[in-house]
Image: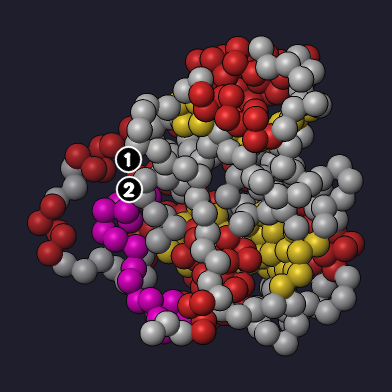
């Protein structure tokens, strides 16, 4: 009844969304703050009668708004808008990564990468992290590969790769193969690789509105690349999924792009909360990896990651545990409001090995 392809699928497992009780959710890297008031205004003023019409298939106004927001020489022709960055990643995998050589990505990174590689029958090689849990740039470049993809800051470590390291990789990687930098968390302290696009036509950058723009409930993401690569992504998109970004999401995205000061403010607050929480945990004897994302990866000597996760959950807070080698004794904690983190800190401070 089922195809051989189906039998080999290994689906992505998202963070749990329990319905049995009310938890403080610090397990899915959602933004604890609401979107810009301009987004609320766009929703209030939206004319529902427009829903009888199909939306602009090219998201023309949204792409122009994103280009203005990004600056740095980015034009609308360099942008593909999609229904979430995961959809955009799907187009990227199909368009640029082939089966003649393995795709390279870090051993511990966004868990959708091996899912898409399996779905499109793309062989891949997981590159072990360095001893400090950073991405090993030289190892990523070793051997023949059909492409390179990594998150920056990486997930679930939160560790940021400086632009000089990315430039180092691009200088040494074949220019006819694509390097993809997934910048889902770049607005929490890192510097975007968008400034490198003018020098490297094989660079593709993926961004999302889910994290720093508080849009986890609205699927909206985009790719930024040389116009030739963006056109190729649109060819893929229109060949098997022609559905454009829906009309309301386009309006909301345009409104969000028009209020950068609001997002700088709330994301600055998240960064401050992250640093205060990190300092407190370290003082209390916890090992916290240096994060430039809206989450931290932590452990405590003598405690198993699963037991830490379960203890925190029993006290009404959800965090994320990955039962996989190397990071199985860590838990990943999304940064919430100062009140959320103060409550969690009290729970964690009481944990003893």
> What residue is drawn where x is 87% and y is 63%?
139
Alpha-carbon span between mark 2 and mark 1: 5 Å
Whole-percent x, y for residue 164 in the image: 83, 53
- Number of numbered callouts drawn: 2
- Using the image, determine if residue 341 lies above or below residue 85: above
* Lateral position of residue 1 relative to residue 44, left or right: right
> Which stretch appears magenta?
236-254
Q: Assess whether mark 1 and mark 2 are in contact (beta carbons under 8 angstroms).
A: yes
Question: Which disc is residue 111 wearing?
Answer: none
- Using the image, determine if residue 225 lies above or below residue 238: above
Whole-percent x, y for residue 41 in the image: 25, 37
Report which quarter residue 172 is drawn in.
bottom right
* Quadrant placement of the C terminus: top right
Question: Which disc is residue 252 wearing?
Answer: 2
Whole-percent x, y for residue 346 in the image: 60, 12
Mark 2 / mark 1, whichever is N-terminal: 1
> What residue is drawn where x is 57% and y is 24%?
312
Depth check, front residue: 140 or 302: 302
> What residue is drawn where x is 72% and y is 32%?
304
Depth check, front residue: 105 or 191: 105
**Label 1's element?**
helix
Q: Is residue 238 magenta?
A: yes
């Amino acid at each position: 009844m089922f195809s051989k392809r189906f039998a080999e699928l290994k689906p992505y497992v998202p963070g749990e969304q329990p319905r049995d009780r009310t938890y403080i959710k610090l397990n899915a890297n959602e933004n604890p703050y609401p979107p810009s008031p301009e987004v609320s205004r766009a929703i209030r003023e939206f004319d529902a009668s427009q829903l009888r019409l199909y939306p602009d298939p090219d998201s023309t106004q949204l792409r122009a708004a994103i280009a203005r927001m990004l600056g740095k020489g980015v034009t609308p022709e360099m942008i593909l808008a999609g229904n979430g960055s995961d959809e955009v990643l799907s187009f990227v995998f199909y368009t640029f990564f082939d089966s003649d050589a393995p795709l390279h990505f870090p051993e511990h990174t966004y868990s959708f990468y091996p899912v898409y590689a399996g779905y499109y029958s793309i062989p891949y090689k997981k590159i072990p992290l360095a001893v400090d849990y950073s991405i090993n740039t030289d190892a990523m470049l070793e051997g023949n590969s059909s492409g390179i993809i990594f998150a920056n800051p990486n997930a679930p470590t939160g560790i940021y790769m400086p632009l000089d390291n990315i430039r180092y990789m691009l200088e040494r990687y074949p220019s006819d193969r694509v390097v993809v930098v997934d910048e889902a968390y770049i607005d929490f302290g890192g510097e975007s690789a968008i400034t490198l696009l003018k020098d490297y036509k094989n660079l593709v950058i993926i961004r999302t509105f889910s994290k720093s723009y508080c849009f986890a409930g609205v699927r909206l993401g985009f790719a930024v690349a040389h116009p030739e690569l963006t056109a190729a992504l649109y060819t893929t998109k229109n060949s098997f999924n022609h559905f454009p970004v829906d009309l309301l999401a386009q309006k909301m995205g345009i409104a969000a792009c028009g209020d950068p000061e609001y997002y700088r403010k709330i994301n600055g607050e998240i960064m401050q909360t992250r640093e205060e929480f990190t300092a407190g945990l370290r003082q209390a004897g916890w090992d916290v990896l240096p994060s430039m994302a809206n989450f931290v990866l932590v452990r405590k000597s003598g405690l198993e990651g699963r037991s830490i996760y379960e203890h925190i959950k029993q006290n009404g807070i959800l965090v994320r545990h990955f039962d996989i080698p190397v990071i199985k004794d860590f838990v990943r904690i999304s940064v919430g409001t100062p009140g959320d983190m103060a409550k969690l800190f009290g729970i964690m401070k009481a944990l003893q090995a």
